[in-house]
Amino acid sequence: MERTANYLSRRNVLKSVGAAGAISLAGCSSSDGGSSGGGGTDREIMQGFLLPLTGDLGALGTAMRDAGTMATSQVNDADNGITVDTQEEDTQTTVPDAISGANALVNAGYPMMVGGATSNIEIGNQVFVPNEMVACSPSNTLPTLRTFDDDGFFYRTTPGDRYQGFAMAQAASEQLDGIETAATTYINDDYGQLLSQWFTDHFEQGFGGSVQQQVVHDPTESSYSSVLQTALQDDPDLFVAITYPQSGTQLFRDYYADFDTGRPIMLTDGAKSPTLPDEVGQDMSNAIGTMPAADGPTYDAFVSQYEEEYGNAAAAFTAQTYDASAVTLLANAAAGENSGPAVRDQMQNIANPGGTKVTIDNLAEGVEMAANGEEVQYVGASSAVDFDDEGDLQAGTYELWEFDDSESGINRLDLVTVDRDQAIEPGN
């Protein structure tokens, strides 16, 4: 189901108002984009964060949190009358804890949040949609979120896995030699199951390959030998593992101990941790991966500032998290109030083309402009951050990567852009 009909287009004003009475919409959009008035600069913006600070994705989530709070600090440090109040909730990489954390933000009065991080729809169903909270995820790639009945409250600064499934299949067919068959094992959640299926559909229907096995694995198993035995029983040309770093460590220890034939391995964004080879005890030189690329107009500036601030290389999804934080801050400033519906109605206005460009270099100034009713356009670090009417990015860019012995531990091999026509479900 597409977004509900009672949600006005984010880029258009109400075309008519009944004669019986006027309708007032806080922060409603203007026909040419941009802010409709703002609320002035003497106010507080409330920004929530719902990210995996511990658990299977803890290593990624803490770096993402740092990137998001870098944006709030820029606004707070500007001393322009606007302050940002933040609250962090740890999902612990589990759905129940994510729901609990989201509820904590709702109960504390936060109208918007950066998160969640993992590809799950229950947080929206149970928390942010019924409570009218804006959620802007930097890493939820679930394909079905495009048709999730969210009343316009969900956005993301990373492309969905309908794009990544194509990028994986294309890489298997065009970047690797002689790949005709593949097998997948995938983490037991929506992200794993759906990405495995999208890769399979594109690989088989779009590139003429054959996926022999798709085998699920749980993140807490002490041994993955039986999973690997089942997945690799037909000796595929390519082994695709859709997993997370913590579970991936044991998975690949078992793989290299008993199942490695030198075949190439394909990973995804969930396993892009530079410490994974050391944890496994192998250089994993036969592995390549795909992930949504951070390749926006201001990516280099973001990397420089992030490394200066934290002393670490910008990790996976950090640029997307900065963008999610920045765009929600701007939308809240333009809305002029800590109201989820009002913030929602400004999200496209401050992100899509039109108005003074706002980047990482002038974010605090941009928030002030939006608060004063000026038209702004956020230009991001991970992408241009140009939203469509489903809250998705207009296109997806992916990087092909490999592990190496550099300081970052990751080497970017190539960038590929996937458009809507390529990313549609095969056969449709």
Image (spheres, grey):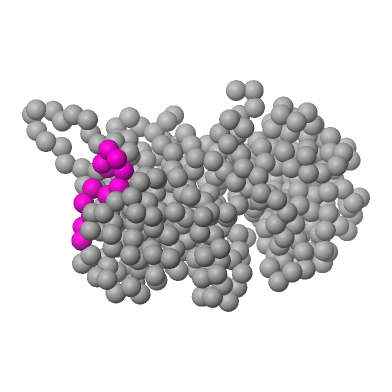
| Image height of 241 relative to 390, above or below | below
Of residue 101 and residue 294, the one placed in the foreground of this image is 294
Q: Give the quarter of the image for residue 363.
A: bottom left
Q: Give the quarter of the image for residue 200.
A: top right
417 sits to left or right of 231: left
Residue 98 seen in the current view: no
Location of residue 371 in the rendering, given as x and y in whole percent from the top left corner = 25, 58
229 sits to left or right of 146: right
Q: Residue at x 21, y 67 (%)?
A: 42
26 sits to left or right of 75: left
Q: Residue at x 74, y 42 (%)?
A: 171
Magenta residue span: 29-40
- The quarter of the picture where the N terminus appears is top left
Q: Residue at x 46, y 49 (%)?
A: 385
Dominant SS of magenta comes to: loop
| Image height of 60 relative to 419, above or below | below
Location of residue 76 in the rendering, given as x and y in whole percent from the top left corner = 34, 72
- The quarter of the picture where the C terminus appears is top right
| Image height of 160 relative to 201, above or below | below
Q: Is residue 174 magenta?
A: no
Q: Is residue 39 magenta?
A: yes
Number of numbered discs on residues:
0
Residue 166 seen in the current view: yes
332 sits to left or right of 16: right
Of residue 97 and residue 89, the one placed in the foreground of this image is 89
Looking at the image, which residue sits at the far top?
Answer: 428
Location of residue 4 in the rendering, given as x and y in whole percent from the top left corner = 35, 32
Location of residue 128 in the rendering, given as x and y in whole percent from the top left corner = 38, 48
Q: Residue at x 8, y 29 (%)?
A: 20
